[in-house]
Amino acid sequence: MKNVLEVLREFFLLGLTSFGGPTAHIAFFRDRFVGVKKWLTESEFADQLALCQFLPGPASSQLGLTIGWRRAGWAGALAAWTGFTLPSAIALAAFGIGVSFFGEGLNGAGWLRGLQIAVVVVIANAVASMWTSLCPGKLHKLIALVAAGIVLATSPAWMQIVVITLGAVAGLLFLREEDNRNDSKGLNEGLNSVRSSQLFGVVCLTLFFALLFGLPILTKLFPGQPLEAFTGLYRSGSLVFGGGHVVLPLLSEEVVGPGWVTKEEFLAGYGAAQAVPGPLFTFSAFLGSLIDGPGGAWGMALICLLGIFLPAWLLVLGVMPFWQGAVRRPGVGAALAGTNAAVVGLLGAALYNPVWTGVIHSALDLVFLLGVAAALLVLRWPSWLVVILAGVAGWVVF
């Protein structure tokens, strides 16, 4: 129980302070759970990240699930998701309820600009650290650079899956020595005696596909907004690759198309979602709060929130039992080394576009960034404190 409460506390703090989208969340997770808490090693973190990058859904939330699971079992996974998701879900649902009173002009707010610049520094620090630890050799570095180049030169979100797969193949072909990683044994021994049966994994995966194909049939048999909304959100969460921003067109089709939410409301909610910490998928709580259903606005917000996150739960819980066994097989260490290098390249590409290109536009932005870098990298202040202070400073400066 102590570990569960610890997981809840840590992720709730991150849920209050993790601004900047999935790439930034991954950087915050690495800073906290690898650098500060030391719940897992750099390689273990990268292995779990590679798994979540392979799966559809919100990669940062899925990564949080695996970290909570490793620390305190299924209760830890639930605590991690609850702590990380609850702050932004409540904020966006409340915003949906009072959408006519506030929400305009959020993207131009000075405090938000300060937060965005702070996130650039946090991500850059994470990428630099992962480059050092996960790309020790020339071939590792080459895989990372090629991966970054491919992603920057192409636009489809599914290309990251191709890049990760190519990284695994390159690892198998050229990095066979990685089979003897010093911490490969720790990947399985560091689970605090938590084990998951493959039968349970099969049940979760079966349920995932049963809901994906069965929910549309149920909506035909039992029409109604709550079930239709849950079905649409579940479908969106099941089919999206590439993070929270990629899901927006799918969500627009599901809620704006039927006329449940206007285009203006949808865009206002999207703007608000940029101004709150935590996963962008909590945008679903805002959408639910605008849809009529049982329990009023809060009830529909919960239905939509569970609908979009349930696929991530089922996929992670379904794949994890097989993943933890796969990492012990010959050749998998080399494949993971290549995969990890490719993931570094993906994060590096994301650091440039959309993070850097979307945030740094002037000399003042660059000066502000240098100040944040001094606080984080020289003075060694904790990242969550730097983010909060950057928001306050941004409110004053911009």
Image (cartoon, grey):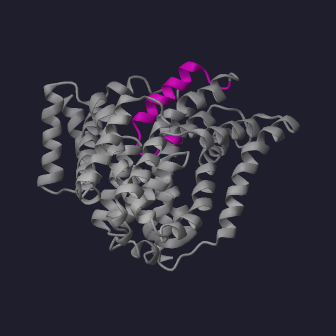
Magenta segment includes 153: no
> In the shown orientation, is residue 16 left or right of residue 378?
right
Highlighted magenta segment, given as a residue range: 260-281
Which residue does the image show at 17% across and 38% down from the upper left?
369
Identify the residue shown where x is 30% and y is 39%: 351
Q: Image quarter for residue 33?
A: bottom left
Q: Can residue 227 be seen in this view?
A: yes
Majority secondary structure in the magenta region: helix
Tell me the quadrant of the picture where the C terminus can be found.
Answer: top left
Say left or right for 254 vs 12: right
Magenta stretch containing residue 264, yes or no?
yes
In the image, what residue occupies the spot 28% across and 63% down?
A: 35
Task: Indicate whether 305 appears above or below 113.
Answer: below
What x and y, as percent, mark residue 83? 48, 57
Please state the horizontal and vertical placement of residue 382, each as a whole percent of the image. Answer: 24, 57
Residue 253, by quadrant, is top right
- Tell me: residue 210, above or below residue 194: above
